[in-house]
Image (tube, rainbow, N blue to C red):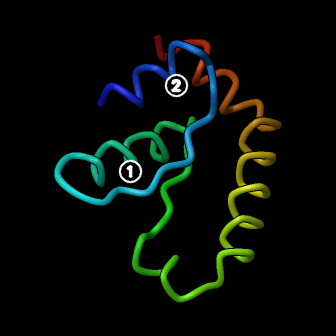
Amino acid sequence: MNSVAEALYAQVPLLCMGLFNDQFDNCQAAEDRGFGKALDYKASLKISLEELKTLVDVELKRLSETQTVKDSLRHAW
């Protein structure tokens, strides 16, 4: 949860990929609340590193330009 709290405090959109324990829930919560995007670990294994990099770049750009994300980040902390 610490990374999520740090992202909220810094008002940075969160792009995350849960690997164990509470990370799955934290990623889903960030997406549900509009300040992040959860990536699927298993799906990421099926694409190339270049495709994954492109996906990350596109999602971060989209998240940083979305007013809902900005509002969520501003009010979440």
Q: Say if 10 sits above or below 41 in the image.
A: above
Q: Which residue is mark 1?
A: 28
Query: Residue pushed farthest left?
Result: 21
Where is residue 73, by image quadrant? top right
Where is residue 49, by image quadrant? bottom right
Q: How far apart, in angstroms, are the residues tagged by discs 1 and 2?
A: 15 Å
Q: Nearer the viewer, residue 45 or 59?
A: 45
Residue located 79% across and 58% down the image: 58
Q: Nearer the viewer, residue 65 or 46?
A: 46
Residue located 72% across and 47% down the image: 60
Q: Say if 50 sits above or below 62 in the image.
A: below
- Report the amino acid beneath label 1: Gln
Query: Residue pushed farthest front?
Result: 49
Instruction: Give the position of the N terminus as an image quadrant.
Output: top left
Q: Which residue is mark 2?
A: 7
- Report the amino acid beneath label 2: Ala
In this rendering, position of residue 15 left or right of residue 27: right
Tag 1 near tag 2, CB within 8 Å: no
Question: Where does residue 67 sit, x and y in percent of width and height?
Answer: 76, 30
Of badges 1 and 2, nearer the viewer stands 2
Q: Label 2's element?
A: helix
In this rendering, position of residue 16 left or right of residue 72: left
The local crowd at label 1, few if under 14, some if 14 to 19, many if 20 or more residues have their Cα within 10 Å, is some
